Image (tube, helix red, strand yellow):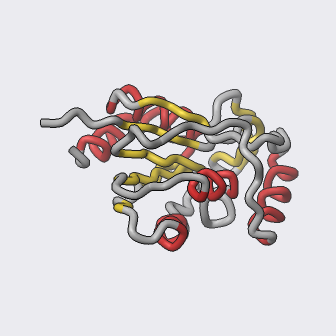
């Protein structure tokens, strides 16, 4: 059996986040923590999708800026990039922002050729699930092998390791 080359590309927000009805300060975003679990389970490489201009620390300011980007269909410039040609499977992680993927994830997706790659989306949220991100992913990259995504309750990431592991192992 051929060894799979796995990439875990994720966008995560550090700073103020909404969690269980209140605003909390996170030094490490929920999606980053989920991505680290996936890397441990799959042996995949981690790559953080980061916007060149950081989002505000403040939750309200970050929400306002992300809504504006979505309304403008913006494609923010990324801080760095990665060559994905050597990867067979890509786990794509992001928080549910405004019902879909944050706009830097759209930039990342549009900057790469996903032909022949399997894409596994995972999404941290506080009750809104995957939103319309799976449909947006397929619309953005028609013809890709997009697998069923995993919604992860953001405030429960640290206790979701078994769920994440079962989902990842289901793709072998």
Image vertical order of residue 72 relative to residue 155, above or below = below
Q: Residue 84 location, x and y as percent?
A: 47, 42
Residue in the image at 48% along x and 48% along y: 92
Looking at the figure, which quarter contains the N terminus?
A: top left
Residue in the image at 83% along x and 64% along y: 68
Viewed as shown, does residue 146 lie left or right of 108? left
Q: Nearer the viewer, residue 40 or 127?
A: 40
Q: Residue 57 location, x and y as percent?
A: 83, 39
Looking at the figure, which quarter contains the C terminus?
A: top left
Q: Nearer the viewer, residue 165 or 10?
A: 10
Residue 116 appears in which quarter of the rendering? Answer: bottom left
Residue in the image at 27% along x and 37% along y: 4
Q: Residue 104 location, x and y as percent?
A: 68, 52
Q: Nearer the viewer, residue 79 or 57?
A: 79
Q: Nearer the viewer, residue 154 or 2?
A: 2
Q: Residue 124 location, x and y as percent?
A: 54, 49
Marker count (numbered):
0
Residue 73 appears in which quarter of the rendering? Answer: bottom right
Image vertical order of residue 148 relative to residue 164, above or below = below
Image vertical order of residue 111 relative to residue 47, above or below = below
Viewed as shown, does residue 134 lie left or right of 73? left
Image vertical order of residue 77 relative to residue 128, above or below = above
Residue in the image at 65% along x and 30% along y: 28
């Amino acid at each position: 059996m051929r060894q799979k080359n796995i990439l875990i590309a994720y966008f995560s927000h550090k700073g103020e986040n909404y969690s269980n009805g209140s605003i909390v300060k996170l030094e490490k975003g929920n999606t980053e923590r989920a991505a680290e679990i996936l890397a441990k389970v799959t042996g995949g490489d981690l790559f953080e999708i980061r916007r060149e201009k950081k989002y505000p620390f403040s939750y309200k300011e970050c929400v306002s800026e992300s809504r504006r980007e979505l309304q403008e269909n913006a494609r923010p410039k990324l801080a760095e990039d990665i060559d994905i040609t050597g990867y067979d499977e890509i786990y794509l992680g992001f928080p549910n922002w405004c019902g879909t993927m944050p706009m830097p994830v759209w930039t990342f997706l549009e900057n790469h050729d996903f032909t022949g790659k399997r894409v596994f989306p995972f999404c941290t949220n506080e009750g809104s699930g995957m939103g319309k991100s799976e449909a947006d992913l397929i619309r953005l990259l028609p013809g890709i092998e997009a697998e069923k995504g995993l919604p992860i309750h953001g405030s429960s990431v640290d206790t979701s390791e078994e769920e994440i592991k079962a989902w990842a192992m289901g793709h072998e």
